[in-house]
Image (tube, rainbow, N blue to C red):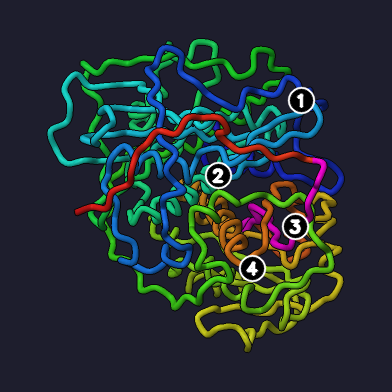
C-alpha cells in the first residue's frame, strides 16, 4: 500500500476542480432525500438546556481585552450558554414548501457535518460523563456515564467529529476538504462563545485518533449499526482561567453506554471510497502533549464599528451572504481591522490554536477605500514572508502598503482594475467573488507540512476554516457580511499567482461585502414556542 504522504497528495490532486472539469461528485441531487441534518442517539437520556445567551452582556470588543469579562462559574447554565453561542440554531428559513435551519457555526452548503460532544466532570447540574449536543432541541443526550460521580474540580471538554456523508452527499470526493474547513469554523465559533463567558479554550494536542475516538464513543461499531459513522477531529478544553491543557483519562470498563445512532440517509445513491482512504491516511497518532505556552503579546486593536454591541447578538446574527451589492465600498478602517483580526497576535480566537501558522491570506481588493484594486499579500508569520516571496510570481516588485497600520505586513503584489472579473472566473464563475468589497485566497505551506506529518493535511484545512470564521465574525462586527467559497479552480489560481510545484497550495476562498436581502425567504425564530427554563448565569466568586 502507498504511504500516507502519497495518498494525501493523490487525494489533493484528484479533488482539484479544473477549468475543463470539476472534481468527482454526484450527477444529480434529490433535495427531498437530503441526509437528516440532525444526529440523535435513541435511548440516551435527554437533558433540555436553558436558553440564556440573551443574558450575556459582554460587548464584542470586550472579548479581546484580557481580564475584561469576569469568568462565569462552570455549571450547567454556563455550558448551555457556551453551546447556544457555538452550535445552536439561530433561525428557521422558509421559501415555499422548503424549510431549513440556520446555525451559529457555518457550514458548506448548510449541510453541517460537525457534531459536538461534551465531556463533563464535576459540573453542577450536569451528569458526569459523555454527552452529545442536539442542536434542534438545544439539549444534551447522555451517551456514557461513570458509576461514581467525580469528586474533583469541575472540568469541561468539547469534542468535535465529522459525519462525512453529509458533505459527500452533495460534494462528492471533495467533501473531506469541506469537513475540515467546517471543523475550523466550529472551533472558531466555540472560542468566541467561550470568550463571552470569560473562559479560555485550547485545542488539546497530543491526543491521537484512536484515543479521541474511544473518548467520544465513536469506535463503538455496534452503537452505529447501519448509521453513518463519525470521524473524530478535535478535543478542546474549556477553562475559566489560563492553566495547563490536558485530556481526560480513558473511560473505565464500568462506564455505562447508552444510545443508538439514527441513520441519516437510508438510500445513498453514491459511494466515495477515496474519502475513507484520505481519512485513514491523515489520522494523527498518539504523541506527547505540547507544553502550555504563555499568551502572545497582543497587537493593538482598534474598536470595531459595532464593537459596543453585545457579542451574543453579533454571534447569532452571523449569516452567509448569498449575493452582494456590487457598488458598495468598504472604508479603509474596516478593512484594516478585519485584516488585523487574521493575525495570530490578535488574541481570540487564535489563542485556542496550538500550532504554528501555516496558512496565509492573499487579499483581492475590489472596492476598498484607500487601496487600488489589486492583489495584496498578508503573511501570518515572520518566516512565511520569505517562503511566499520565493514561491509567488505575480507582479513586478512588491511594496509594503504605506498607509496600512504598522503591525500589518501587507504587501501590494499587483494593481489591476479587472482582477475581480478574473477572480469570479477562478471561483467557479460565482458572482460573489467579484461583487464583494474584497475577496481572499488562503494559501497553505503545503509540501513541507504534509510530507513530514500527513495528518497535518487536516490541520491546514482546519486553520483555513478558523480564518474563515474570523472573517465571518469580524465582517459582522464591521457591519458587513462574509461568505466562504469552497469551489474554485485550484491550479488555475496557482497559475495566476505563478505558483509552481507544491510548496504552496490554495485551500479556500472567502468574500466580504454588503449583502443583498431576499424578501422571498421568511425567517422564523430558532426555538419559537419553547417554554423558557428559568436559569441564571453566575460569575465565579
Task: Determine whether 392 is above or below 71 in the image.
Answer: below
Q: Magenta segment, which residues?
A: 502-520
Q: CA distance from mark 2 to mark 3?
A: 18 Å
For label 1, count other residues whose C-alpha is less than 10 Å away and answer few (under 14), some (14-19) or many (20+).
few
Residue placed most toward the observer, 510 or 453: 510
Q: Which quadrant of the figure has residue 326? A: bottom right
In the rendered structure, which disc, 3 or 1, sits on the residue that comes first in sequence?
A: 1
Q: CA distance from mark 3 to mark 4?
A: 34 Å
Q: Are marks 4 and 1 in contact (CB under 8 Å)?
A: no
Q: Are marks 4 and 2 in contact (CB under 8 Å)?
A: no
Residue at image location 75% in from the left, 78% down from the top: 414
For label 4, count other residues whose C-alpha is less than 10 Å away and answer few (under 14), some (14-19) or many (20+).
some
Q: CA distance from mark 4 to mark 2?
A: 37 Å
Label 3 belongs to which residue? 515
In the rendered structure, which disc, 4 or 1, sits on the residue that comes first in sequence?
A: 1
- How far across and how far down the image is residue 447, in percent? 56, 54
Label 1 belongs to which residue? 31
Q: Are marks 2 and 1 in contact (CB under 8 Å)?
A: no
The image quadrant where one finds the C terminus is bottom left
Residue placed most toward the observer, 351 or 308: 308
Label 2 belongs to which residue? 104
Amino acid at each position: 500500500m502507498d504511504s500516507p504522504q502519497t495518498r494525501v497528495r493523490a487525494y489533493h490532486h484528484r479533488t482539484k476542480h479544473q477549468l475543463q472539469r470539476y472534481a468527482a461528485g454526484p450527477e444529480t441531487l434529490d433535495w427531498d432525500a437530503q441526509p437528516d441534518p440532525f444526529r440523535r442517539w435513541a435511548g440516551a437520556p435527554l437533558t433540555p438546556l436553558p436558553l440564556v445567551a440573551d443574558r450575556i452582556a459582554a460587548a464584542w470588543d470586550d472579548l479581546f481585552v484580557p481580564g475584561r469579562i469576569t469568568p462565569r462559574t462552570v455549571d450547567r447554565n454556563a455550558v448551555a450558554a457556551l453551546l447556544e453561542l457555538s452550535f445552536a440554531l439561530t433561525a428557521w428559513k422558509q421559501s415555499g414548501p422548503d424549510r431549513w435551519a440556520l446555525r451559529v457555526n457555518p457550514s458548506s452548503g448548510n449541510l453541517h457535518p460537525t457534531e459536538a460532544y461534551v465531556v463533563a466532570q464535576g459540573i453542577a447540574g450536569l451528569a458526569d460523563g459523555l454527552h452529545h449536543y442536539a442542536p434542534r432541541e438545544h439539549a444534551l443526550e447522555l451517551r456514557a456515564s461513570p458509576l461514581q460521580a467525580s469528586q474533583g474540580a469541575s472540568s469541561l471538554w468539547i469534542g468535535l467529529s465529522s459525519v462525512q456523508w453529509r458533505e459527500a452527499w452533495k460534494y462528492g470526493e471533495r467533501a473531506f476538504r469541506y469537513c475540515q474547513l467546517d471543523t475550523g469554523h466550529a472551533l472558531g465559533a466555540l472560542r468566541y462563545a467561550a470568550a463571552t463567558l470569560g473562559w479560555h479554550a485550547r485545542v488539546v494536542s497530543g491526543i491521537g485518533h484512536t484515543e479521541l475516538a474511544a473518548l467520544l464513543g465513536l469506535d463503538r461499531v455496534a452503537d452505529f449499526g447501519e448509521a453513518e459513522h463519525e470521524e473524530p477531529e478535535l478535543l478542546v478544553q474549556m477553562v475559566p482561567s489560563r492553566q495547563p491543557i490536558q485530556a481526560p483519562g480513558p473511560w473505565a470498563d464500568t462506564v455505562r453506554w447508552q444510545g443508538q445512532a439514527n441513520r441519516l440517509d437510508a438510500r445513498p445513491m453514491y459511494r466515495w471510497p477515496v474519502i475513507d482512504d484520505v481519512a485513514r491516511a491523515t489520522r494523527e497518532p498518539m504523541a506527547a502533549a505540547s507544553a502550555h505556552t504563555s499568551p502572545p503579546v497582543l497587537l493593538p486593536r482598534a474598536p470595531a464599528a459595532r464593537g459596543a454591541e453585545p457579542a451574543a447578538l453579533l454571534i447569532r446574527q452571523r449569516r452567509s451572504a448569498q449575493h452582494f451589492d456590487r457598488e458598495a465600498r468598504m472604508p479603509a478602517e474596516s478593512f484594516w481591522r478585519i485584516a488585523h483580526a487574521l493575525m495570530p497576535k490578535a488574541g481570540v480566537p487564535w489563542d485556542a490554536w496550538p500550532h504554528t501558522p501555516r496558512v496565509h491570506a492573499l487579499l483581492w481588493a475590489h472596492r476598498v477605500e484607500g487601496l487600488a484594486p489589486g492583489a495584496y499579500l498578508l503573511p501570518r508569520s515572520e518566516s512565511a514572508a520569505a517562503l511566499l516571496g520565493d514561491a509567488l510570481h505575480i507582479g513586478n516588485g512588491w511594496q509594503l502598503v504605506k498607509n496600512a497600520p504598522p503591525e500589518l505586513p501587507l504587501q501590494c503584489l499587483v494593481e489591476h482594475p479587472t482582477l475581480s472579473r478574473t477572480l469570479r472566473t477562478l471561483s467557479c464563475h460565482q458572482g460573489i467573488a467579484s461583487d464583494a468589497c474584497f475577496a481572499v485566497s488562503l494559501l497553505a505551506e503545503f509540501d513541507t507540512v504534509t510530507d513530514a506529518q500527513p495528518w497535518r493535511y487536516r490541520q491546514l484545512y482546519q486553520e483555513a476554516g478558523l480564518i474563515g470564521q474570523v472573517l465571518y465574525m469580524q465582517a459582522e462586527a464591521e457591519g458587513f457580511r462574509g461568505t466562504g467559497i469552497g469551489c474554485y479552480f485550484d491550479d488555475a489560481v496557482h497559475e495566476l499567482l505563478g505558483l509552481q510545484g507544491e510548496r504552496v497550495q490554495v485551500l479556500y476562498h472567502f468574500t466580504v461585502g454588503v449583502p443583498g436581502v431576499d424578501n422571498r425567504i421568511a425567517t422564523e425564530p430558532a426555538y419559537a414556542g419553547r417554554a423558557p427554563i428559568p436559569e441564571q448565569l453566575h460569575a465565579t466568586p
